[in-house]
Image (cartoon, helix red, strand yellow):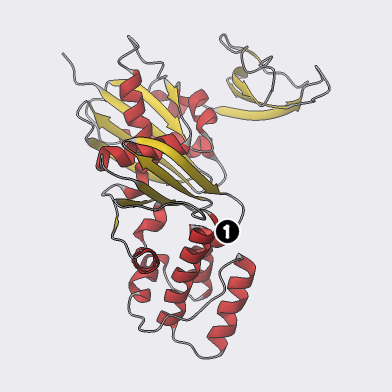
Amino acid sequence: MKNRYFLGIDVGSVSTNLVIINENGDIIKKCYIRTQGNPIKAIQAGIKVITDNLQQLYDIAGVGTTGSGRMLAKAIVGADVVKNEITAHAVAALSFNPKVRTVLEIGGQDSKIILIRNGIVIDFAMNTVCAAGTGSFLDRQASRLNIPIEDFGKIALKSKKPTRIAGRCAVFAESDMIHKQQMGHKTEDILAGLCEALVRNYLNNVGKGKEILPPVLFQGGVAANAGIKNAFEKFLNLKITIPDNYDVMGALGAAILAKEKAKEKQRSDFFGFELSQKKYDTSSFDCKGCANCCEIVQISANNNVIACWGDRCGKWSNNFKTPRKASNS
């Protein structure tokens, strides 16, 4: 009997992550691709990366997608299960530590907190509005200070007295940082201050009113920043654990969910690794079927529509079981 593998894809606005796991749940391959405003190309590039230099392709028995582009990813790859980021991150966290009770997740464009009790998600919150609580905020400030983002946390840890920086708003935080820089504050103190500003923003917005109990896992790309981890431990007075695969936990969760789904299905809907060579097009139109005037997004391969979404009634999204010619109205 051939070994079976499961593919998880997490499509976000900043990065697209892919993970392949075996039947034991071990990660066999993973990759991180910058989405750069083109999730289709990112998915195809990711598929190519994880299949490069393989003498024999993996026998994929299930595919799961998550992230803000999960529906698009489903249409491209033929996913068996589609889940939101909260579910995917919680599943991955529990696979790392079944006793986890709090998950802190900070990505490039959003952040979230997930409360888990006895293996069940009981509450969560997300921040998709203010950039001051996300990785893009740190990227921007690192660029302004001419410091590689990879060195941000390491330099911040050298600080003995972090500079107090207003972190409630990204615009004010940047203005305050420039002011403190002009006043002569040390670079490491400013960086440590930025870390603390981000953490204060996170706890006052995303974590407001939440009971943060240990064990606490810190996931997402920003978990690579040691300064942020240090600031969380300082403010929470708790030990923060960063999983080995902190950067692809969403994709890992999607792969685990695909593995569970495979128990119910005889075969996967996966279109195959050759999808990395196909040409896809996306377009949209306004449906005139009712007063809602929904904007319908459709994705086509070889001028045949393979998926639609955006409608409230299901007129279009439920009507692509067989390919049809693309519509412009």
In which quadrant of the rendered image does the C terminus lie?
A: top right
Camera-side residue of 207 and 284: 207
Farthest residue, direction left = 1
The local crowd at label 1, few if under 14, some if 14 to 19, many if 20 or more residues have their Cα within 10 Å, is many
State the residue in front, 152 or 98: 98
Going 60% across and 57% down the picture, which residue do you hit? Answer: 130
User: Image height check: is 50 above or below 130?
Assistant: above
Question: Residue 180: which quarter of the image?
Answer: bottom right
Residue 273 visible, this angle: no
Return the residue at label 1.
131
Q: Is mark 1 on a helix, strand or loop?
A: helix
Q: Relative to 177, say whether 56 is above or below.
A: above
Farthest bottom residue?
A: 184
Disc 1 marks which amino acid?
Answer: Ala
Task: Give the residue drawn at x 31%, y 24%.
Answer: 259
Residue 47 position in % (x across, y down): 38, 33
> Can you give x and y, in whole percent of width and height, for residue 194 in the image?
48, 72
Q: Is there any visible trace of residue 238 in the rendered image?
A: yes
- The part of the image, by quadrant, that contains residue 26 is top left
Q: Which residue is drawn at 33% across and 51% down?
A: 217
In which quadrant will I find the N terminus?
A: top left
Q: Please state the horizontal and vertical placement of residue 136, each as a whole percent of the image.
A: 52, 59
Viewer-proximal residue among 257 and 80: 257
Q: Residue at 50% of width from left, 59% of height from top?
A: 202
Give the image location of residue 172, x and y in percent: 63, 72
Relative to the observer, which residue lies in front, 63 or 133? 133
Corner quadrant of residue 303: top right
Instruction: Judge left or right: residue 4 versus residue 108.
Output: left
Left or right of 130? Residue 163 is: left
From this view, report whether residue 81 is shown above or below residue 182: above
